[in-house]
Amino acid sequence: MTGTRDTSLALASLDAVAATGARTVLPDHGDRWTRGAEAAVRRARSVGAH
């Protein structure tokens, strides 16, 4: 996955990330997330657009 400057598009695609059921998420930047894809999506939505 490549990064996007379109935050609304990125937020709209979060359902696909959550649906993977992955336990570990490797973002394009930052540390790996080991709390699961659904928790990563909840976190992203709580931060929202920036």
Image (cartoon, rainbow, N blue to C red):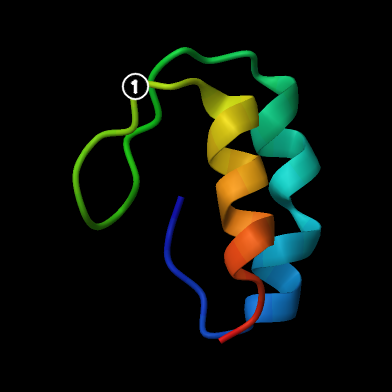
> 35 above or below 47?
above
**Quadrant of residue 9 within the rendered picture:** bottom right
In this picture, residue 19 sits left or right of residue 10 = right
Q: Quadrant of the C terminus?
A: bottom right
Residue 38 at x, y = what percent? 65, 28
49 horizontally vs 27: left or right: right
Q: Is residue 8 left or right of residue 32?
A: right
The residue sitting at the left extreme is 31
Instruction: Look at the picture and state if 5 lies above or below 9.
Output: below
Which residue is rendered at x = 25% and y = 34% of the image? 32
The residue that label 1 is drawn on is 34
Residue 7, image x, y percentages: 63, 79
Picture quadrant of residue 2: bottom left
Residue type at numbered disc 1:
Thr
Depth check, front residue: 4 or 36: 36
* Up-down relation of residue 27 to residue 11 (above or below): above
Residue in the picture at 34% in, 32% down: 33
| Image: 25 above or below 43 | above
